[in-house]
């Protein structure tokens, strides 16, 4: 029998590295496992923001990070959804709200009732039946008084540098050692990393190495069989520009994603500024042209801090090789279109914690981890790709090509089943649930041809009453929600009171 | 094509009447007609039938009152399955419904803590960490909600009932809601010459029953799905060689146990399903190792009461219809595949087929995309159940007969092989969140069959020995208190759902 795992080394930088270290420390340090971070140079720019899904709150809770600190230290803005505009020449924008298992209507999914209603002439748009979307439009944060359960949640936009610093501070305080360095060499034996050699000559051994270095893949990139499978045939954008613009007042409760001729622009409100990102295809336009067009596209002046970088989307064929586990963007990367960057890190970490290896030997967990990460990646890629596939920007070569291109079978099946019946066949390890896919597909104009025949068993009056009741419920719930600025003021006064009490 | 209006169910029995009852409830008979064709001549396979907890969802769909249902079908309550002589002769284990242990705060699955405790020399009998298992052993039962402190979930159970009375009960339900039964044997099928869709079935007396959608509940032979559409069959007898069953009811000799018993035998296994009025028994075996006559003889010798009928032989091949849904025909029940009743999944597979059909049911033309979706989802379920059942045969110490020598040395599907490897390494049972059989089931069976994990999740080491001791004592104490408060199974039935004498005499 081989040895038990005793020493884990996390190699990386910024939020992903500290998230990994915090989670590992939190769950296995009591079992006698030590964690050390080799902190690589940051890859963040001052203008960078993270956009996070509501699930990140679960991660903070797990590691014991007080949620209020995000708002007081990381310039965070709570958002209830993401608004997609200009993805169609004619149709109105829509909001993908962060709904959480919407209640059934007459025992069926509400979408099914809506489809029939639509066929019978109901004019109310689908997003008005989404609690989170309506909250987002109203500039309100989906929280209920007294912490009551809601069928909606909020995600956040965070200042990336401040959030990374907060996690770093929090993790170090929890007893994790770290050292700032770069990797000079990696000593391997077969599929196994024996040690990493740092730039100052130090040789760092460990039983398990976690690669949280992002797309540079400082460790996994050197492992056998972990080469990258590119997704460019489906996802053509290969450039990303980040910049800052002035803050918005009052603060909106959503991020805005607008398509333009050669890609898309994202505007994510933060407390002190708006984070701007542009993602596009270098074969269609130049960095300079995008920078010049940006103020007009964003409809606001752009600061002088713009930085452009390459973007390559794809997945490593293996995410866990020997004793090296890749998490987040060192395993696979996508555009920041659906705010999944930190989610990928979080999901990989929780899988790693579930399958945390017992012995520093053969790692039979690797295969299962690989399969899970692969499913996660494909599901997220398909969600992102659906935006492109369903665009209705006609007579623009970039968008026409996106619309006409064949999509992977996994996505095609979802599109087909949704078109046929308004249902979305979910796979295992789906981040986005049926309500998210419904919102995405219907928002982009994909209308189901039929609905569940059980809807026909509902008498017409009852059907109308159900639809009306859903609208009324949502209006009532949203009216009781705080506007973003009130929500932030509430956090601040809570913090001030605590400081005084401690004080 | 016109609106799908007229639905024809070919074949009665459990599958046929479950389908007809669900259709009558869900689609109703205002805008649809529901016709079930069955022949008294053919008879049904149904014997004593055991179920698994998701049957509650089917009953809820129908809005069935549980007490009435139990009374009408001579049913008993089931907390799990006892497996005797499966690992080796003289051994036994219990596959309980419910969950193993309880959550330990901030930790990993309970099993890991328990494995740690056993590796440190603790008692390897895990039964006092599963309320359902303890209650079963002591013959107790009641409906128990989740504990107020959230430590224990509600007591999880299913039913054991008489399949013939179950079908009769559902028939009454369906007919009261307007479903129509037609007596007769199907002798011919009319198809549309262009589309190949079934348009009508013809009965022996010349009657023509036309429909827009046909449910094939004709049993093993698959009158429509195979007879008409040649849907094909994946033969799984390499992994599941049993191809015969002999069944016989016997007199009840004691209060009914709140569990099913499965005893491994020389060439297969014997079931014992206690009902209120009698006990169902059967011997599932492979005829390459034991003749039908010998099997019947051995079964009769091994009954715990006087036989109430002549033994009935059933012949089958383990496997799955390659396509369960073709054009306007859906196979439900044995026509869609056969997996031996070792884990009581037959009714579950029927129920899932029906519920999925509703999700994908056509309004007008049948959409191939939805058919494909249905077939894929059923494949996943069938493969999962298949793997779980194969695990019982593959993982065993028995080598006392050629049958068991074959089972333990046979190759298994890759999907199962990977599971067995990870389980033996670290007790990992977390495969897919959507799996029917979850952590407790895989653990109980694989561990019970003798696959002992070498290790466990390292987080389980985070507790000190004292803390672990206290946590385990707290959980087993809560379970003990829960079980102590239960009445006997027989007393519970007597209190609310005893079958009426008329039904008992049937």
Image: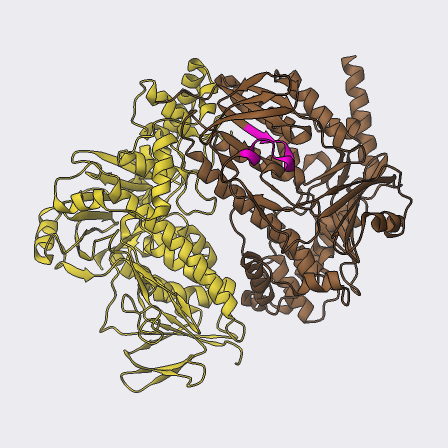
Chain colours: A brown, B yellow
Q: In the depicted view, which residue is nearer to us: A10 or B395?
A: A10
Whether residue A374 is visible: yes
Quarter of the image for residue A457 reads bottom right
Please tell me whether residue B189 is drawn above or below residue A300 in the rendered image.
below
Q: In the depicted view, which residue is nearer to us: B170 or A32?
A: A32
| Image-based side of A166 in relation to B416, left or right | right
Whether residue A124 is visible: no
Q: Can residue A218 be found in the magenta stretch?
A: yes
> Which residue is drawn at the image coordinates 50% and 73% (left, top)?
B366
Q: Can residue A211 be found in the magenta stretch?
A: yes
Picture mark count: 0
Quarter of the image for residue A10 reads top right
Please tell me whether residue A121 is drawn above or below residue B486 in the rendered image.
below
| Image-based side of A215 in relation to B482, left or right | right
| Image-based side of B48 in relation to B482, left or right | left
Q: Residue furthest right?
A: A301
Q: Position of residue A139 (x, y in %)?
A: 81, 45
Please tell me whether residue A28 is drawn above or below residue A329 in the rendered image.
above
Say which quadrant the C terminus of chain A sits in.
top right
Q: Position of residue B402 (x, y in %)?
A: 13, 46
> Which residue is drawn at the image coordinates 41% and 86% (left, top)?
B193
Q: Position of residue B503 (x, y in %)?
A: 26, 58
> Which residue is drawn at the image coordinates 60% and 28% (left, top)?
A20
> Which residue is drawn at the image coordinates 36% and 29% (left, top)?
B129
Say which quadrant the N terminus of chain A sits in.
top left
Q: Position of residue A458 (x, y in %)?
A: 59, 66
Residue extent of the magenta highlight: A210-222
């Amino acid at each position: 029998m081989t040895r038990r795992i005793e020493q884990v080394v996390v190699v990386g930088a910024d939020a992903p590295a500290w998230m990994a270290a915090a989670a590992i420390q939190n769950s296995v340090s009591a079992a006698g496992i030590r964690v050390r971070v080799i902190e690589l140079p940051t890859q963040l720019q001052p203008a960078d923001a993270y956009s996070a899904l509501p699930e990140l709150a679960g991660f903070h809770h797990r590691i014991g990070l007080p949620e209020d600190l995000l708002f007081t230290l990381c310039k965070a803005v709570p958002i209830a959804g993401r608004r997609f505009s200009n993805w169609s020449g004619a149709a109105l924008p829509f909001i993908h709200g962060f709904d959480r298992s919407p209640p059934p209507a007459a025992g069926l999914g509400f979408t099914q009732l809506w489809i029939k209603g639509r066929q019978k002439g109901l004019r109310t748009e689908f997003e008005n039946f989404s609690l989170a979307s309506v909250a987002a439009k109203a500039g309100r944060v989906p929280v209920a008084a007294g912490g009551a359960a809601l069928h909606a949640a909020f995600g956040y936009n965070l200042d990336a540098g401040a959030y990374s610093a907060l996690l770093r501070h929090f993790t170090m305080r929890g007893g994790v050692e770290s050292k700032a360095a770069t990797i000079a060499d990696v000593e391997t034996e077969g599929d196994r990393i024996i040690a990493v050699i740092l730039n100052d000559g130090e040789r760092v051994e460990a039983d398990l190495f976690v690669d949280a270095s992002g797309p540079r893949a400082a460790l996994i990139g050197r492992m056998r069989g972990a080469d990258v499978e590119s997704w460019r045939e489906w996802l053509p954008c290969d450039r990303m520009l980040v910049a800052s613009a002035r803050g918005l007042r009052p603060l909106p409760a959503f991020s805005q994603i607008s398509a333009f001729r050669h890609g898309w622009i994202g505007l994510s409100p933060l407390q002190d500024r708006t984070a701007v990102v542009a993602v596009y295809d270098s074969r269609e336009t130049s960095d300079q042209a995008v920078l010049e067009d940006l103020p007009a596209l964003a409809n606001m002046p752009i600061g002088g801090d713009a930085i452009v970088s390459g973007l390559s989307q794809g997945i490593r064929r293996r995410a866990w090789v020997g004793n090296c586990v890749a998490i987040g963007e060192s395993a696979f990367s996508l555009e920041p279109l659906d705010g999944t960057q930190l989610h990928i890190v979080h999901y990989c970490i929780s899988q790693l914690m579930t399958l945390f290896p017992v012995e520093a030997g053969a790692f039979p967990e690797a295969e299962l981890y690989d399969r899970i990460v692969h499913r996660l990646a494909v599901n997220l890629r398909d969600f992102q790709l659906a935006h492109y596939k369903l665009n209705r920007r006609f007579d623009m070569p970039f968008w026409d090509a996106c619309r006409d291109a064949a999509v992977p079978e996994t996505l095609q099946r979802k599109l087909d089943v949704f078109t046929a019946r308004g249902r979305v066949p979910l796979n295992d390890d789906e981040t986005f649930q049926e309500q998210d896919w419904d919102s995405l597909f219907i928002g982009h104009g994909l209308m189901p041809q039929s609905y569940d025949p059980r809807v026909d068993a509902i008498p017409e009056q009852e059907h109308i009453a159900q639809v009306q009741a859903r609208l009324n419920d949502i209006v009532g719930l949203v009216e009781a929600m705080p506007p973003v600025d009130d929500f932030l003021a509430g956090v601040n006064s809570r913090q001030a009171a605590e400081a005084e009490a401690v004080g | 094509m016109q609106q799908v209006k007229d639905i024809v169910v070919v074949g009665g029995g459990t599958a046929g009447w479950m389908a007809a009852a669900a259709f009558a409830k869900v689609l109703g008979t205002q805008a649809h007609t529901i016709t079930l064709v069955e022949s008294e001549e053919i008879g049904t396979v149904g014997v004593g039938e055991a179920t698994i907890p998701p049957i509650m969802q089917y009953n809820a769909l129908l809005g069935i009152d549980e007490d009435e249902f139990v009374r009408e079908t001579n049913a008993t309550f089931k907390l799990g399955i006892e497996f005797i002589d499966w690992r080796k002769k003289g051994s036994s284990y219990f596959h309980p419904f419910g969950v193993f242990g309880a959550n330990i705060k901030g930790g990993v699955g309970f099993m890991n803590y328990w494995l740690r405790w056993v590796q440190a020399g603790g008692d390897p009998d895990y039964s006092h960490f599963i309320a359902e298992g303890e209650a079963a052993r002591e013959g107790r039962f009641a409906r128990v909600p989740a504990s107020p402190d959230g430590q224990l979930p509600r007591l999880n159970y299913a039913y054991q009932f008489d399949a013939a009375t179950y079908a009769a009960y559902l028939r009454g339900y369906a007919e009261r809601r307007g479903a129509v039964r037609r007596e007769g044997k199907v002798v011919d099928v009319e198809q549309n010459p262009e589309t190949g869709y079934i348009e009508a079935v013809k009965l022996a007396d010349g009657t023509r029953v036309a429909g827009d959608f046909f449910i094939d509940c004709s049993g093993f032979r698959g009158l429509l799905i195979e007879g008409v559409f040649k849907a094909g069959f994946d033969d799984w007898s390499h992994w599941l060689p049993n191809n015969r069953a002999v069944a016989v009811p016997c007199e009840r000799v004691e209060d009914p146990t709140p569990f099913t018993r499965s005893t491994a035998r020389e060439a297969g296994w014997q079931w014992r399903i206690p009902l209120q009025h009698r006990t169902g028994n059967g011997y599932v075996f492979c005829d390459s190792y034991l003749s039908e006559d010998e099997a019947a003889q051995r079964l009769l010798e091994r009954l715990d009461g006087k036989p109430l009928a002549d033994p009935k032989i059933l012949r089958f091949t383990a496997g799955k219809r390659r396509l369960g849904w073709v054009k306007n025909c859906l196979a439900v029940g044995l026509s869609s595949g056969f997996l031996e009743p070792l884990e009581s999944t037959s009714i579950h597979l029927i129920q899932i087929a029906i519920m999925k059909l509703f999700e994908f049911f056509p309004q007008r033309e049948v959409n191939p995309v939805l058919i494909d979706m249905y077939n894929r989802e059923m494949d996943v379920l069938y493969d999962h159940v298949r793997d779980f059942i194969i695990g019982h045969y593959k993982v065993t110490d028995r080598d006392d007969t050629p049958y068991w020598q074959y089972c333990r040395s046979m190759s298994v599907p890759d999907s199962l092989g990977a599971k067995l490897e990870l389980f033996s390494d670290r007790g990992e049972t977390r495969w897919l969140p959507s799996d029917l059989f979850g952590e407790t089931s895989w653990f109980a069976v694989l561990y019970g069959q003798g696959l002992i994990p070498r290790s466990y999740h390292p987080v389980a080491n985070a507790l000190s020995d004292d803390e672990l001791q206290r946590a385990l004592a707290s959980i087993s104490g809560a379970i003990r208190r829960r079980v102590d408060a239960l009445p006997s199974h027989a007393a519970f039935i007597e209190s609310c759902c005893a079958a009426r004498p008329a039904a008992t005499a049937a």
